Amino acid sequence: MFKNLIRIGVNLSLFNTTYVLCKTIKDEKLPHYHFLNEQDLNKLLKKHQNLSIIERSYTEHILSIIRDVETDTVEFRKNSDRLIRILIEQAISQIEKKKHVKQSPLGYYDAHEVKFEDEEICFVSILRSGNAFLFEGLNAVSGASIGQILIQRNEDTALPSYLFQKLPSNIKDQQVILMDPMLATGSSATLALRILKNQGVKQENITFLTLVSCEQGIEKLFREFPKIKIITAQVDPILLKDFNYLAPGIGNFGDRYFGTVKKSQQFGQQQ
């Protein structure tokens, strides 16, 4: 594949541009991060049977846009919503189905539909960034209930602090889709999962959705909650431990999605 790219580059005379770009990155002392290859991803999937990584061909264009520091709020939000919808549909596809016979305009067929009614599904967002999932979630499952958990990082200890929760009274009987766009250390997600466990929700009834993750965060969640399902669009190669940031990452997803920060201030916390 790399040889093909070289051949294409020569034919299109793109190497001068590539050299200038690489030189600029070098001059500014910015690291160039390389994503996990297919072999590494397959090892990760083999290790964690309940992990799903969306096929790269569906996500790489969208992720390339939302990672870009030059992407404005409108484009960031639009493309984030596209990616979120893919994750939502993947989560729904993993919910248990029921088979029955239905009629099309031309005859009968075997239908395979989600076993549960809309009201038996609950979207739980980890505030504030998790709220970005709600629009697409309710487009897909309009009758689902909504739960919210507010977790904030303690600046003194760098640990997550629980502040607030509002969950359906019958959540222990529901299929729960927990949502947070970034999975870095896994501390916030772990705290949210403990809250759901305390409410009586079974691990096997929880699916955690995240746009971008890393191996450390995935390991942490499965170590304590081995029966949950995790669906992610991409696994980033690096967790910057001094800052608890994913790299190359997205920056502060909430600020970029909700338009509460300028471009020059897009670097933000992740848990």
Image (cartoon, rainbow, N blue to C red):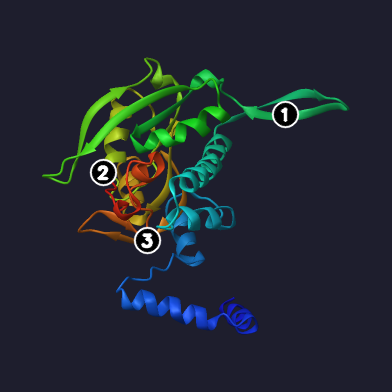
Mark 1 sits on what residue? 111
Residue extending furthest left?
156
**Residue 137 pos. (x, y %):** 51, 31
Residue type at numbered disc 3: Pro
**Quadrant location of the N terminus in the rendered image:** bottom right
Q: Nearer the viewer, mark 1 or mark 2?
A: 2
Mark 2 sits on what residue? 187
Q: Secondary structure at mark 1?
A: strand
**Residue 34 pos. (x, y %):** 42, 68
**Residue 201 pos. (x, y %):** 37, 26
Q: Give the Cα separation between the discs numbered 1 and 2.
A: 40 Å
Mark 3 sits on what residue? 248
Name which residue lies at 55% across and 34% down: 92
Give the mark nearer the N terminus: 3 vs 2.
2
Q: Secondary structure at mark 2?
A: helix
Contact? badges 3 and 2 (CB < 8 Å): no
Residue type at numbered disc 2: Ser
Residue extending furthest top?
169
